[in-house]
Image (spheres, rainbow, N blue to C red):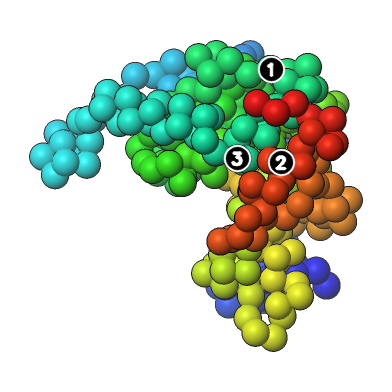
């Protein structure tokens, strides 16, 4: 039994009072494959676009109650700070610079004004990649410092790189699971982060990184696609071995508080990628 299956089974056993021999309810229907631009609003919500209201053409309207407590009402200032952080990361962030060079070498050069947008998002996310517009969203209300913006940009640029170099279909749950595995593998997980989210202990150090990657990939798939938990777990487990082993274009798993980011950036030309 895989790690995700074990975790899900334990959670289900603890929360589901239904007897084991009871009838299993029908699974939620998987959305059809119409292009996002042609989908009704209800269907677009099922595909995760409700997390990014400005993607639907809506204008964010702060609530007076939250303005009084200083939680909203500074959207223009937040956007300006977000754009400043994005610019700093593009000029100084080793992984962001590496990814931009790799995208340019792959025939998909980035234009900051065209391909990166700072927007107000749902508090459950810090960023996103819109394959319809080929655009990265940085959530200005959540990613408020350079470190967070650097992580968001690196994560979403991996999705952009996969979309540029592969026949990637984000409506295919296996494809989505694969690119989420790669992004978590290359941009996020370390032993410390695995410990913080409960996926590691002194007794399973060897598997800590893999379990962290699986957990993050599963959470991402469930956040943006209307599939059942079982379907998401199956997709992650199905593609994990191949996608976890794919380290392009960074070439290594990044350890926290190490020189790995700088080493990956300096090694990029050795693998045929431009230096941005």
Percent across and percent down for residue 85 are: 41, 33
Tell me how far mark 2 sits from mark 1, CA to CA: 19 Å
Which residue lies most toward the left here? 68
Element assignment for label 2: helix
| Residue at screen point 87% across, 56% down | 241
Tell me how far mark 3 sits from mark 2, CA to CA: 9 Å
Determine crowd level at label 3: few under 14, some 14-19, many 20+ residues with C-alpha closer than 10 A: many
**Residue where numbered disc 3 is placed:** 94
Determine crowd level at label 1: few under 14, some 14-19, many 20+ residues with C-alpha closer than 10 A: some
Closest to the observer, 237 or 80: 80
Closest to the observer, 193 or 31: 193
| Residue at screen point 65% across, 84% down | 202
Residue depth check, mark 3 versus mark 2: number of the one nearer the observer:
2
7 left or right of 142 in image: right
Give me the disc on residue 109.
Answer: 1
Q: Quadrant of residue 13?
A: bottom right
Tell me how far mark 3 sits from mark 1, CA to CA: 17 Å
Closest to the observer, 124 or 230: 124
Tell which circle, 3 or 2, labels the residue nearer the N-terminal end.
3
Tell which circle, 2 or 1, labels the residue nearer the N-terminal end.
1
Percent across and percent down for residue 47 are: 61, 33
Residue depth check, mark 3 versus mark 1: number of the one nearer the observer:
3
């Amino acid at each position: 039994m895989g790690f995700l299956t074990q975790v899900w089974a334990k959670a289900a056993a603890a929360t589901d009072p239904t007897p084991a021999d009871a009838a299993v309810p029908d699974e939620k229907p998987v959305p059809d494959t119409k292009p996002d631009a042609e989908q009704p609003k209800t269907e677009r919500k099922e595909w995760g676009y409700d997390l990014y209201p400005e993607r639907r053409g809506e204008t964010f309207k702060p609530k007076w109650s939250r303005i009084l407590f200083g939680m909203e009402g500074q959207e223009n200032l937040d956007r300006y700070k977000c754009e400043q952080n994005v610019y700093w990361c593009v000029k100084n962030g080793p992984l962001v610079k590496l990814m931009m060079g790799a995208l340019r070498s792959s025939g998909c050069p980035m234009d900051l004004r065209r391909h990166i947008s700072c927007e107000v998002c749902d508090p459950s996310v810090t960023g996103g990649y819109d394959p319809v517009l080929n655009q990265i969203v940085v959530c200005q209300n959540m990613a408020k410092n350079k470190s967070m913006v650097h992580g968001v940009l690196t994560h979403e640029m991996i999705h952009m790189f996969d979309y540029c170099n592969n026949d990637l279909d984000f409506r295919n749950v296996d494809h989505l699971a694969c690119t989420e595995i790669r992004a978590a593998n290359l941009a996020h997980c370390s032993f410390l982060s695995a410990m913080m989210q409960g996926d590691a202990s002194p007794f399973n150090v060897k598997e800590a990184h893999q379990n962290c990657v699986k957990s993050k990939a599963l959470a991402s798939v469930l956040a943006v696609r209307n599939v059942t938990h079982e379907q998401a777990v199956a997709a992650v487990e199905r593609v994990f071995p191949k996608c976890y082993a794919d380290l392009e274009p960074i070439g290594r798993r990044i350890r926290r508080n190490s020189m790995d980011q700088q080493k990956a950036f300096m090694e990029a030309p050795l693998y045929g990628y431009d230096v941005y």
